[in-house]
Amino acid sequence: MLAGFASIFRTPDLRNKVLITLGLLALYRMGCFIPIPGVSYRSVQTCIDVVEGNSLYGLINLFSGGALLQLSVFALGVVPYITASIIIQLLTVVIPRLEALKKEGQSGQAKMTQYTRYLTVGLAVLQCTGIVALARSPGRLFQGCPEQLVPNQSIAVVLSMILTMTAGTVLVMWFGEIITDKGIGNGMSLLIFASILSAFPGQFATIFQTKGAFILGLVLLVALITICAVVYVEQAQRRVPVQYAKRMVGNKLYGGASTYIPLKVNMAGVIPVIFASSLLYIPQLIVTLSGSQSGWAQWIQTNFTTGDKPIYLLTYFLLIVFFAYFYVAITFNPVEVADDMKKYGGFIPGIRAGKPTAEYLNYVLTRLTFPGSLYLGVIAIIPFAGFAMLGVGQNFLFGGTSLLIMVGVGLDTVKQLQSQLQQRNYEGFLR
């Protein structure tokens, strides 16, 4: 491993890519602690201490690395861009124009990226306006904290707050695209990775101070076992063999190659866990914002506030399974894959081209999605249940979402580094 790192820094262009990535990640983390104009920094810190340990605020802060509750320049982080990307991806299934753009190759992808940017800015303006509106009223953004977060509430100050947070979101989006184009790995994924990872030292320190070294060791053991299981399953895939027939084009013979379609066990990635987590926090958010003390509100507070309740865990598991099937169904089209194979003379051995191939791919995908969805549900529940039994459920937000993101981004980045190194090592053969 040390030799690999040394090889990276001995290669000038690869070293530059790594330094660009690390530099932009450092700038991103720095901007997470620069408050926007018009906010009382001391009042914000007081309110953060009041709501510390609330799981709802923990989820809100997860993808921003603590920037949202700090009301900083990068308060929204990558959330608007991720939301816009998911919306565009979902709309591709129902809007023929977007589906046609997706098939146009690089030019169509560039237009879809532009649409995603525009939607990101729109979502950022809406979310910034909502956050600023809550921050202006004491006790709304931070429940139970009567501090005045925005002392001067003039129109000019409010507009400058919204403009600064929106500009910060656009800058974060630019950081992510620069890392993707000129750095190593997927930019947005690495920004999320840095945000999640930044919270761990403080959480480990809190567990050590409140529970002791033994409980901290058990927490690390549960985390390590879960990470090993995730790495093992994330690498698993079903390879469907594909044979291409030989064709005569002019005087040359093409085709005859054998390849495969890699179908991962976890085709949906982390998206089902994110959707399920977001939906589960909506009831708690409604109760928190409404301030109701009626029977239904008390029931939600009892069963959906922490991750150690049976109803919470069962609902979480079922939602993950549902969204796994839903997301795989809209992102992988067996009919489209079968048509493309038929167009270029490809076929699956033993399966006729066309509709039988699409039915076979759908059959294989359905069987793969079942264990994949169960795996996602179990991985998401194990940290909640395990850390709750250890008594650190409220202090440690190492849930399924953060776990899958970190492992997935880590594996993808390492693979890109390895491929870059292999290209340099085999450069003499390619010439």
Image (spheres, rainbow, N blue to C red):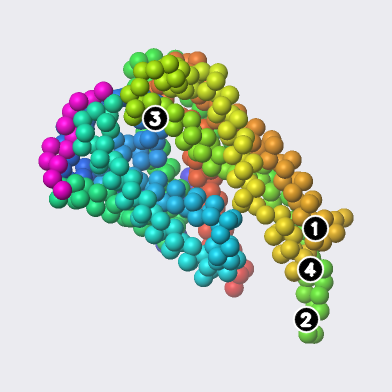
Of residues 20 and 131, which is closer to you in this image? 131
Residue 366 in the image, given as x and y percentages of width and height = 72, 43
Secondary element under disc 1, as helix, strand or loop, is: helix
Crowd rating for badge 3 (residues with CA inside 10 Å; few <14, some 14–19, many 20+): few
Which mark is nearer the camera, 2 or 1? Answer: 1
- Placement of 171 over or under 224, stated as above or below: below
Distance from label 3 to label 4 (Cα)? 55 Å
Circle 3 is placed at which residue position?
286
Residue 158 in the image, given as x and y percentages of width and height = 19, 46
> What secondary structure predominates along the stretch shown in magenta?
loop
Q: Quadrant of residue 346?
A: bottom right
Which mark is nearer the camera, 4 or 1? Answer: 1
Question: Residue 209 lies in magenta, yes or no?
Answer: no
**Residue 313 horizontal side relative to residue 172, left or right:** right
Residue 414 in the image, given as x and y percentages of width and height = 52, 48
What amino acid does circle 2 point to? Val
Residue 345 tag number: 4
Question: Residue 152 lies in magenta, yes or no?
Answer: yes
Mark 2 and mark 4 lie on one chain; the one further toward the N terminus is: 2
What amino acid does circle 4 point to? Gly
Mark 2 and mark 3 lie on one chain; the one further toward the N terminus is: 2
Query: In the orientation shown, which residue stands out farthest toward the right?
Result: 350
Which mark is nearer the camera, 2 or 4? Answer: 4
Q: Quadrant of residue 258?
A: bottom right
Residue 250 in the image, given as x and y percentages of width and height = 78, 85
Which mark is nearer the camera, 3 or 1? Answer: 3
- Placement of 175 over or under 49, stated as above or below: below
Secondary element under disc 4, as helix, strand or loop, is: loop
Q: Quadrant of residue 37?
A: top left
Circle 2 is placed at which residue position?
249
Crowd rating for badge 2 (residues with CA inside 10 Å; few <14, some 14–19, many 20+): few
Circle 1 is placed at which residue position?
355
